[in-house]
Image (spheres, rainbow, N blue to C red):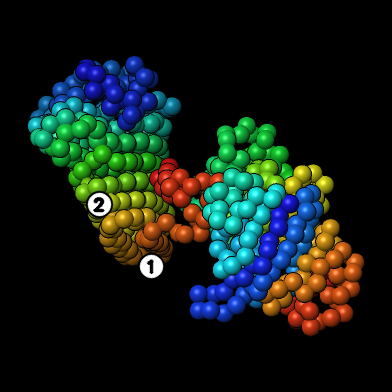
Amino acid sequence: MLRLENISWSTPDGAGVLRDLDLTVPDGKLIVITGPNGGGKTTLAKIIAGIYKQDSGRIFLNDEDITDADITERARMGISFAFQQPVRFKGITVRKLIELAAGEKLPLDKICSYMSRVGLCAEEYIDREVNSTLSGGEIKRIEIATVLARHSTLTVFDEPEAGIDLWSFTNLIKTFEDIRKSLNGSIIIISHQERILRIADEIVIVADGSIKAQGDPDSMMKLLLENNSVTGKCFRQEEMF
Amino acid sequence: MNEITKDLLREISDWNGEFKGAYNIREDGQCAGRVSSKNIKIESKTDKPGLEIFIAPGTKGETVSIPACVTHGDVDDLVYNDFFVGENADVIIVAGCGIHTETGEPARHNGIHRFFLGKGSKVKYLEKHIGKGHGTGLRSIDPVTEAELEEDSVLEMDTAQIGGVDRTTRITKAQLGARAKLLIRERILTEKEQTAKTDFRVEMNGRDSGVDLISRSVARDDSHQEYHSVIVGNAPCTGHSECDAIISENGKVDAAPELHARDNDAALIHEAAIGKIAGEQILKLRTLGLTEEEAEATIIDGFLS
């Protein structure tokens, strides 16, 4: 279980992005955090992973205080983070990146199992470098495969739908439905997508640096669709694709 | 052959007590072993130090190894090796060099290699350079490579100098005939006070010839690297060069790529990037559980792999 208490964070020039935010993510649950752009969602995700350090507040993972743990320590405690814009590496192959994520050398069939879950053929990709020759959809799926290989207790996906095409998006939803069924730990997905919101156990609406509402998908979807003042105009519905 | 040579051979070539195929081992300027094969003849030059290697036309799948080792200080080894590759041959040439010194005296190897690729021939050239030993004497390796590629021939050069060599000046020149292809992949790591200069000149004289030159380098500590390439398109051809460098600590890299189009249908491209390791790359690997130091080492290993 992840618990955030009174988390605040400001940009270096003093603009408040998160204000005294509390959030609890129970074990085995899929939480989707949504809300308008600039509302603090990605900042919150990065604070959970340790990429940003909050100005104040405490963070607990399974009742252990991890407030002062850095990125590496949190990763080793079982927190994974899938980047909104996956990082590219010249010279590092897909196989190497997945093995780094798993923390060990892996046989081909194991790599194949992670790659096939994101709709890629391992044999076609494992020797390719994770560089600019990969398309946006390909690198996004590889990013998710690296996270799958980690067997995390808490996985954070920052806008997994960003930068991928419609075909990939349909498969992405299937991938998350599959992860949803098989993953033991908790999942947090930052997303604007209705179809991702619909597979959540709980939706959290973040705007202006704090939680505006929290609840089951049906009631939160209703609230989102009825009340633009909660979501702003940046909430993107599925029909836009 | 002394034990230092054996250690160096293991690192610069696939030697594990023996070589497959033809070979010549050069140890401190002397021949420490030579075997020719039916299709690959190795002979000593008569006018200066070095070898003439004749690869028969149509030779397929054979490897010839010509490693050179300098095992102590106060050696300045100069060697001229010429490779004559027959038409339609398809071979691998392994030409590593190891320098070892335990004294304050300098050790240097200067290998001048000339390649003459016959029509339709294909050569994969592997060259690994290392410096070893605890001596303070400068370890220098100054290779000169000259290649003439006849029609439809392909030369693939894979060269690596990953640490231990204090001074290097690398010169590579090539002339390409019609439809000839030259692929160069160079990797250099310098540390401490080391310096490395690399200079390429490729002239594409034949129609539809092509060169792809990729150089990756890492300059750490107070080391300094200079990269200079000249690609000349004298005919309808394609040329691509890519120079990527990572700098850390006080490492310095100068890159000066030149493209010269002398034909209206010459298509030449150059890409260059110099900078420290991207912070987001380190962040990504840390989210996989690596420390910052492990992440940096992994990124550099991959970059130079």
Q: Which residue is mark 2?
A: B223
Using the image, determine if residue B63 lies above or below residue A233: above
Disc number for residue A183 = none
Residue type (three-letter) at the residue carrying disc 1: Asn
Q: At which x and y percent is residue B202? A: 30, 53
Task: Report the chain holding disc 2.
Answer: B
Residue drawn at (53%, 79%), measured in percent from left and top? A14
Observer-nearest residue: B47 or A86?
A: A86
Kindly check if marks 2 and 1 are in contact, taking CB atoms under 8 A apart as contact: no
Task: Report the chain holding disc 1.
Answer: B
Q: At which x and y percent is residue B11? A: 33, 29
Residue type (three-letter) at the residue carrying disc 2: Ser
Residue drawn at (53%, 54%), measured in percent from left and top? A70
- Residue B185 relative to residue A233: left or right: left
The reply to whether residue A227 is visible in this rendering is yes
Q: At which x and y percent is residue A93? A: 53, 45
Residue drawn at (24%, 35%), measured in percent from left and top? B131
Using the image, determine if residue B258 lies above or below residue B185: below
- Give the residue at the far bottom of this rendering: A229
Q: CA distance from mark 2 to mark 1?
A: 40 Å
Give SS at disc 2: loop
Give SS at disc 1: loop
Q: At which x and y percent is residue B178? A: 38, 50
Label 2 environment density (alpha carbons within 10 Å; few <14, some 14–19, many ≥20): many
Return the disc, 2 or 1, that comes first in the chain's sequence: 2
- Residue A117 relative to residue B59: left or right: right
Observer-nearest residue: B291 or B178?
A: B291
Observer-nearest residue: B90 or A11?
A: A11
Q: Which residue is mark 1?
A: B264
